[in-house]
Image (spheres, rainbow, N blue to C red):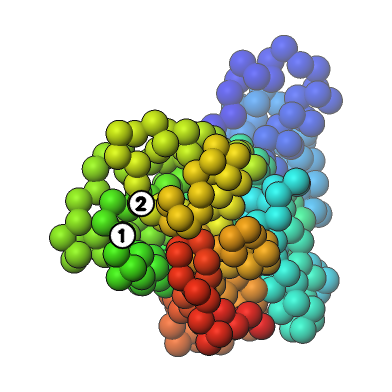
Amino acid sequence: MISDASFKSLDETSRYQAARQLLRMKVLSGELGHGDQLQPELDLCRDTNLSRTTVRKAIADLVAEGLLVRYRGRGTFVSIRRSSVQKKQLALVVCRHAHVAGAHDLLVRGARQAADRLGYQLIVADSRNEEDAALRHAINLNERKVAGTIVVPPQTESPHSTIERVLRALTRAGQRIVVADDLSMDDKVPSVSSQNEESMLTITRHLVARGHRRIAFLTSGRTEAVRERENGFRRAMQEAGLAVPPECFLEVGSRDPARQGLQEVDVFMAMREPPQAVVCLHDLIALNFMRRAEERGWRVPHDVAVTGFDDLPEASRAHPPLTTMHQPLKSIGARAVELLVRQLRGEPLETPHERLPCRLMVRRSCGAEPSPLLSLSHP
């Protein structure tokens, strides 16, 4: 509710502008959802200390903007109207790092290609893995009246809370939504991701089969996709009868992807019994780890085996080349766009939650000679 105290100190024009903006933000933030009824004009007049004429002018402005609609005898309702151009606009909220090429760059590329092929414009918004930034983007996309948004959950301190607030703001504004590169926590929201748990199970089994027994895991963030990969690692260790000591299951100390995995080399090397192999949540951690290990004289794979997850272009060019799981990132981005467009066209989704398979890429960082079949580059 609009507070009396916020307006009494302002002149009539300023109060009108503030009331208009506050009502507008209630709509764009999802506090008032599509189809909700606005409180009666007399209540707005009382709460804002404005005349009925001024309140009606503020409402009329929002009606003209396409955010509200008025029905004689019934009241005013939230009704976000989109032009034919806006109905062809999609968005992708994702975290991309300015100086580090990562998995989400490939996902964006696949999404752009699919949007172009289907005749849609794609707007990319960078969440920077910050809750405030992600919410600001949701409000901005509602303001631009895009038809639908793909959301890659940011790795904030409270990712579940963040994604719930972002999805609520978008859906309450009448947008269609797809969650990409993670699980959807809401059965009504379609999602597309990799088979994270099964894939991490496979790569850990590969290390066990090579004779490694003391295997560490480097993780980061608390999204559902991260939890799936952690579960896959623990399942493989449990089925092999291998313990995972607390000191061998670490969350990287930095949120900067350019530094993740660096200080952890020092931590492991300081142990009385360092790990024989290290499974990394994703390739950037693994590549940083290998670079730091080389600086410290800890040889990969002779002293420690290392694996990643994603199969970034840098993985096959690393020294030694990185054993990893090829994640179909471009396909995830493309499929997310396709699911979004199908919703916009009113077409049913046979499988609302899709999980795409990954592929083990065996290279020298795990101590194995690469298999010509397994190391083929994915298109």
The image quarter in which residue 294 lies:
top right
| Residue pointed to by mark 2 | 276
* Residue 200 found in image quarter: bottom left
Which residue is more in the foreground, 194 or 180?
194
Location of the C terminus by quadrant is bottom right
Disc 2 vs disc 1: Cβ atoms closer than 8 Å? yes
Label located before the other in sequence (2 or 1): 1
Question: Would you say residue 206 is visible in this rendering?
Answer: yes
Would you say 184 lies left or right of 82 here? left
Residue at 80% from the left image edge and 46% from the top image edge: 61
Q: Is residue 243 above or below residue 372?
A: above
Q: Is mark 2 on a helix, strand or loop?
A: loop
**What is the x, y in percent for residue 78?**
62, 55
Residue 214: horizontal and vertical position, in percent? Answer: 28, 51
Q: Quadrant of residue 10?
A: top right
Left or right, 171 with respect to 215, comes to: right
Which quadrant would the N terminus be assigned to in this image?
A: top right
Neighbor class of circle 1 (other Cα within 10 Å; few <14, some 14-19, many 20+) is some
Q: What numbered label is drawn on residue 212?
A: 1
Identified by mark 1, the residue type is: His
